[in-house]
Image (tube, rainbow, N blue to C red):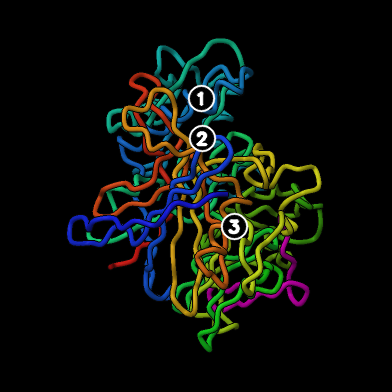
Amino acid sequence: MRRAEASPEPATGGVRSLDEVRAVEVDGGRILFHSSAIGPLEALRPIQGSSGPAEMRELERLFRASILPSRPEIGALVLLRHAGPSPFPASAGEAEIYDPARRAAYWLARLHAEGELRIEEGALRFRRKEYTDYAEGLASRGLLRVIERGEGQTRFLSAYPGLGLLSAASAGRLALNSHFFQMELSDCETAWDLLGTPFGLLSLRGEILLPPLFDREALVIRADGSASVEPRRLRDQAVAIGPDVFRHGENCEFISRPACPRTPRGACVDLVVVGRELVGAVAGGGADVPEGGFVLRAPRGYRPSSLELRYPDESGDRFAIQVGPAMISSGTCARGFTSPMYAKSGVPFPPTVYPLDWEGGRAARIGLGTRRGEALVIWAAGPDRPCDELPTGSVGASLAEFTELCRDLGLDEAVNLDGGGSAQVCVDGRRHLRVSDRDPDTGLEAERPVPLGLAAVR
């Protein structure tokens, strides 16, 4: 690769937007590559948006333009953002669905299968008035979107409440999206799955906001201030429900995908956990394991005292984040995918539909790392498209190229964050990262809703 000289970027809106821009020549074009110092990682703050009418419109656009064209078996798709009281019962046979958003998607699918619900001209028609009132209330607020395509399967998806537009939450700060999240239809196959649920360890200032999943590498700032990239496992993490503390192999069992998509039957109660929520329970086992969570198998007869969970931080970490593959560890570049999350089949779990291509897959990228104790965010613009009115000249970066660029910046430790069409870097409401999503009507760049970001007040 041939590297152009670095150039400064002007400040924007009272917040310094970029520290450095590099144009890196590669075969077939160039990569537009940026980096910015963001202060100590433990000073970052989580930010989330809200799935309102604008976000639901963007979700509909995303499915119409990018997801449904590859799923010809889908005849209709219903997207909803639950709000208000739930008219649906919590009990579903041996299962109790505690979360009303998940409950709504479950019962809509069940009622449709039983002939109690039909879809006509973009509206949901029920036999029971309380269900009709619920659907019409969501539709009137722009929280229900129906995509009809003809004959085929009908799917119902509830949106994660924090799934929002990052630019709208970035006033006065630099914000970047961070975690993988459930976006594809194949990521949401169980009653416990919400569209847009983020997953993977996030620990800030000694508080674990999301638990580790899939035994992946994490960027960690230890109690003594040193940084490292190291694996973090769910089975090493304690889980507290009210006064009760559970540890795998001692007084419970943690069951997660991809090894176990459904739990075996047994004398137990399967508690379904997503993030810091207890979203349901199944007596006697046989529970579907959520794609972005896990099952805590407790003794038979156990009744939780709370639906909110805590993850006691027994490591003393100041900061930890677990998203994509490691890029730099102890100053050494990664040479490919090493985490158990990345199966030998060449397709990671989840997301479930994107083949792995370390050397050749070019896209928008975001990385987070440290250099001699300083935290940096690094990103590369995604590839231009013929319809772009303001082309950047970028061809996007492969993970191999992105890793090499991070090494050239002198990073000691670095991990890849969520990239591609989900990649977002915003300063004061202004977006600074060209991504792949386009509006199918105008051809203009579109902002994909994301569920979780990290913000630095500069």
User: Residue 8: where, in percent of width, then height?
Assistant: 31, 58
Dot 3: element: helix
Magenta segment boundaries in residue numbering: 239-257
Dot 2: element: strand
What whole-number distance in Å separates the C-alpha atoms at marks 2 and 3?
A: 36 Å
Q: Which of 64 and 328 is in front in this view?
A: 328
Residue at the spot x=51%, y=71% of the render?
208
User: Residue 105: where, in percent of width, then height?
Assistant: 52, 36
Q: Which of 92 and 177 is in front in this view?
A: 177
Q: Mark 2 points at which residue?
A: 157
Q: Nearer the viewer, mark 3 or mark 1?
A: 3
Magenta stretch encompasses residue 199: no
Disc 3 or 1, which lies upstream in sequence?
1
- Asked where in the image residue 205 lies, by quadrant, the reply is bottom left
- Is there a contact, CB below 8 Å, between mark 2 and mark 1? yes
* Mark 2 surroundings: few (<14), some (14-19) or many (≥20) residues within 10 A: many
Q: In this view, does 200 lie to the left or right of 389?
A: right
Q: Name the residue under label 3.
A: 403
Q: Mark 1 points at which residue?
A: 77
